[in-house]
Image: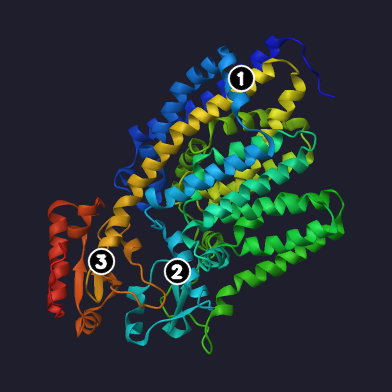
Amino acid sequence: MVGRPRRDGDAHASAGGLFFAGWALALGFLVLGLGLVVAAPEAILTREHKQLPAFMFLTQDLIWLAVVVFFLPIVGALAWRQPAASLWLMARLPDGGRAIAVQVLLLMAFAIAAVGLVFHHYPLAMDEYIDRFMARIMLEGRFTAEIAAPWRDFAEALRPTFVHLLGGGTHWAAGSLPGNAALIALFSAVGLGPWSHVFLAAGAALVLAMLVRRIFPASPWAPCLAVFLLVSCAQFFLTAATPYSMTSRLLFALLWLWLFTRDDAWGHGLAALVGFAAMGLHQVHVHLFFITPFILHLAFQRRFVLFAAYALWYLAALAIWLHWPGFIAPAPSTELVPGSPPPSLGLVERIELMLSNGRDWSELWLFPAQIGRFFAWLSPPLVLLALLGLRYLGDAPPLIKLLCWSMLTTLLPYLLLQPTQGHGWGYRYAHPLLGNLAVLAVYGWYRFREEFESAVLDRARATLAVVGIAGLVVALPLRGMQAERFVAPFARAMAYIEALDVDAVVLAEDVWYGRDLRRNDPWLKDAPKVLSADLLSAAQLRDLCRGRRVVAVDSEQLRHFGIVPLVAGEDADILGRWHRARMRTAGCQPIDTR
């Protein structure tokens, strides 16, 4: 039995300390960001790829952190000192299952709107695009697409990033594993493809509610609180509006936890099947890092038969998924085209690289910035209650401790092997951990209620609700505008390219993330085809222009859409003139694309 101080002053002091800890954490990350502004390498300011998370931290997250540092004490103090108003608000909020349904429906409504209004139906990162690419192939009942014969000689220049050539250059497929693409294809088959991950996010919220109900069976309010903490995170609701595999990873992580915690034959058997599917969502390592503490704990419990069953199952699953490219490669050749990069399995390749050649440790300074991004994209109540959960972690049940260990085993490998994430809303590599954080936060509130049975609890609950709702009202439009501002130039540029009435576009990738505009449909039926100028020889360029309408596109056109050129001023003009002169030499007819 937990001791229960009778004095309200103890609860006041504990709640005040909690808010101060959250405020201090926000202030710490704000100071970190301001320090980066002062000492930022030139690479950040010029938006070099590896420093993109730091660039986004500085241009997006410092604003939110400043809002939190300034307004959290004000909003929190006003809500605490005006309990009547806060309790009036709480009395009018739905509770129980109705509250969960309302929250999930509001999440879906915003995310569905954000697909068009914020992201313009444009998969920004190539991780998003290749899953859409692969989904189109799967809708034809295949795992690879045959490259149309007239275009095979140009396959390398046509190949989008992370798409790989197979069968001696006759076919291609996405370099990632197929699970997330299969989910997109499944929703696309019924006309819901653009909003597939909105439904997956709603499913994740519902599974979280079921998991929390099992962990806290005597607390009917716990599932509703967990769902609120999840859906009020900017990272969760904006990522749900994208095809990123992070949403499906979160859903499968929560589903695996729900099945694993049944702790019976059906639960473990189904958890093994879910685990196999989770490994194949996009990259094989993510699920393995997540489940490691839970599987090892079985050995510490001396449940050696169950431990061995899981270990053998996952070893077999790992062998299958690591050989996935060989399974789908068309016969008779299973070889990659010489010079084509191997299908990417993410950290598996990075481990091999680190062991053979070492790594560039200078990238490690980016990791704190990415943790700062993750913190800045969480809702304030989730942060506050997760800190409260950590306060009570010493005598927490084993499951709560395992959830914390799972966060460590998931994040620490990225510190060593992939300290920069590239694109992402928040810190996407931590996305599967949002469920862990929500459960930890609910546990913190559960223990706080046990320790302080007082009317102060109602005031604390109402204050957290006010802070959460106020934060959501600010975060939703702010983060939506920030994301739209970042994505819109690329969406407009891609729309411009696709609208050109030509057979092919030779793209000079002389703008920021210009290679990401090299996007072609798997069957090469759509026009125009987009080819990289850097990957075409003079002979190939002559062949391409023979009998086809071909146009050059470079920073001269694309910068009008807000995309930043990689070089500026006279250098940009010289590069553009050289690119267009090369086209004329090859016999391409100039077409006005302005």
Residue 285 vertical placement versus 447 (above, below): below
Q: CA distance from mark 2 to mark 1?
A: 50 Å
Q: Is residue 427 visible?
A: no
Up the image or down, 126 lies above or below 528; here it is above
- Identified at 55% across, 25% down, the residue is 466
Earlier in the chain: of badge 3 and badge 2, it is 2
Frontmost of labels 2 and 1 is: 1
- Of badges 3 and 2, nearer the viewer stands 3
Looking at this view, is 439 or 460 the one in front? 460
Dot 2 or dot 1: first in sequence order is: 1
Q: Which mark is residue 231?
A: none
Residue type, mark 3 in image: Ala
Residue 370 position within the rendered picture, expressed as x and y whole percent measured from the top left: 48, 42
Residue found at x 24% / y 71%: 506
Q: Is residue 453 left or right of residue 561?
A: right
Per the model, the C-alpha gap separating discs 3 and 1 is: 55 Å
Q: Which image quadrant: the C terminus?
A: bottom left
Q: Which amino acid type is marked by label 1?
A: Leu
Left of 570 or right of it: where is 337? right
Mark with earlier residue (3, 1): 1
**Residue 20 falls in image quadrant:** top right
Badge 1 marks a residue whose secondary structure is helix
The disc at residue 133 is 2
Q: Nearer the viewer, residue 549 or 536?
A: 549
Residue 499: numbered disc: 3
Q: Secondary structure at mark 3?
A: helix
The reply to whether the C-beta atoms of the residues labelled 3 and 2 are less than 8 Å apart is no
* Inter-mark Cα distance, 3 to 2: 19 Å
| Residue at the spot of label 1 | 87
